[in-house]
Amino acid sequence: GEWIREGRVPLQTIRAKIDYCSYAVRTIYGALGIKIWIFSDT
């Protein structure tokens, strides 16, 4: 039980970090895309 409990938490943490990183990357690229679109439009 001890080993399984310790093994399960890091997996959730890693998955949460990956979700956050992919969300942050999408947000950054989205903001850059909007800025590029605005600058190229004017």
Image (cartoon, grey):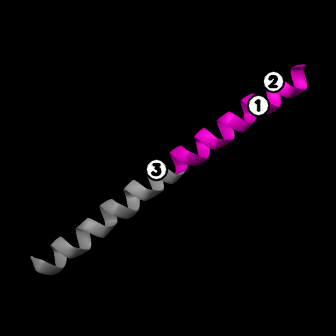
x, y percent for residue 25: 60, 47
| Discs 3, 2 touching: Cβ within 8 Å | no
Q: In which quarter of the image is the N terminus?
A: bottom left
As for residue 31 lying within the magenta part, the answer is yes
The numbered mark at residue 38 is: 2
Query: Pointer 1: residues within 10 angstroms few (<14), some, or many (20+)?
Result: few
Please state which amino acid type lies under the numbered disc 1.
Lys
As drawn, 32 above or below 14: above
Residue bounds of the magenta highlight:
22-42
Mark 3 and mark 2 lie on one chain; the one further toward the N terminus is 3
Residue ID for mark 1: 35
- Find residue 5 and report its image quarter: bottom left
C-alpha distance separating marks 3 and 1: 22 Å
In-front residue for pair 8/32: 32
Give the alpha-carbon distance from disc 1 to disc 2, as whole Å.
5 Å
Q: Identify which amino acid the numbered label 3 is placed on.
A: Tyr
Query: Which residue is denoted by mark 3 in the rendering?
Result: 20
